[in-house]
């Protein structure tokens, strides 16, 4: 009986090691894009939040099943006030500053096909500018979350959208192991 419990505990430990967020397994936006590059794309929790203090998430990442369907390809983060500073969550190069549809957007290229975008953000930076983690990118503008000050933060690897929260938090599932009680199994 002890051998069976030991085997079960070892299998559970092995399961906790192999659990990965969906993007690390190569599944994003309903497509399978497994590559060695995707497994290392988002070092869990190594980026900083683009707003301080740590913002509330007003709307979560909800990618569509197919690229052409509607969904929420990023997260909406509450700003403390209109005009709040927006900072670079990781180092990179500004690849775009401009208006998309009717909102001012800034995009940072972090290398290896990884880009993050923020809207609505007013920025005086220009494409080609280098930014370090924590550098101010610009200021939050009104208009995205009705009357609540917020920014939309999106992250892409190539053409695939990733959950930005995986870059600032460790979202891996936890597995609880059974509590060993020596008296119950005779040991």
Image (spheres, rainbow, N blue to C red):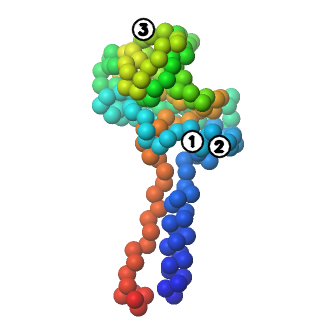
Evaluate if marks 1 and 2 touch, with contact meaning CB atoms under 8 Å apart.
yes
The secondary element bearing badge 2 is classed as helix
Between 81 and 20, the residue placed more toward the observer is 20
Between 163 and 59, the residue placed more toward the observer is 163
Q: Name the residue at the bottom extreme.
A: 186
**Residue 109 vertical position relative to residue 164 in the rendered view, above or below:** above
Label 3 crowd bin: few (<14), some (14–19), many (20+), radius 10 Å: few
Evaluate if marks 3 and 1 touch, with contact meaning CB atoms under 8 Å apart.
no
The secondary element bearing badge 1 is classed as loop
**Residue 164 vertical position relative to residue 11 in the rendered view, above or below:** above
Q: Pointer 1: what residue?
A: 40
What residue is rendered at 49% in x and 34% in y? 164
> Relative to residue 110, is residue 90 drawn left or right?
left
Q: Pointer 2: what residue?
A: 36
Between discs 3 and 1, the one toward the N terminus: 1
Between 78 and 18, the residue placed more toward the observer is 18
Marks 3/1: CA distance? 32 Å
The secondary element bearing badge 3 is classed as loop
């Amino acid at each position: 009986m002890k051998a069976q419990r030991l085997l079960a505990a070892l299998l559970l430990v092995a399961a906790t090691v192999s659990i990965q967020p969906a993007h690390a397994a190569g599944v994003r936006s309903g497509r399978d894009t497994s590559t060695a590059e995707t497994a290392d794309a988002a070092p869990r929790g190594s980026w900083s939040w683009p707003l301080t203090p740590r913002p509330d998430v007003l709307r979560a990442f909800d990618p569509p099943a197919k690229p052409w369907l509607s969904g929420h390809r990023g997260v909406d983060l509450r700003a403390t006030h209109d005009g709040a500073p927006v900072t670079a969550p990781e180092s990179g190069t500004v690849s775009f500053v401009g208006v998309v549809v009717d909102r001012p957007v800034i995009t940072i290229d972090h290398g290896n096909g990884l880009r993050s975008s923020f809207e609505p953000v007013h920025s005086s930076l220009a494409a080609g500018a280098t930014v370090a983690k924590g550098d101010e990118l610009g200021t939050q503008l009104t208009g995205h979350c009705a009357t609540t000050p917020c920014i939309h933060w999106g992250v892409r690897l190539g053409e695939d959208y990733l959950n930005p929260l995986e870059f600032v938090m460790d979202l891996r599932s936890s597995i609880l192991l059974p509590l060993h009680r020596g008296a119950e199994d005779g040991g």
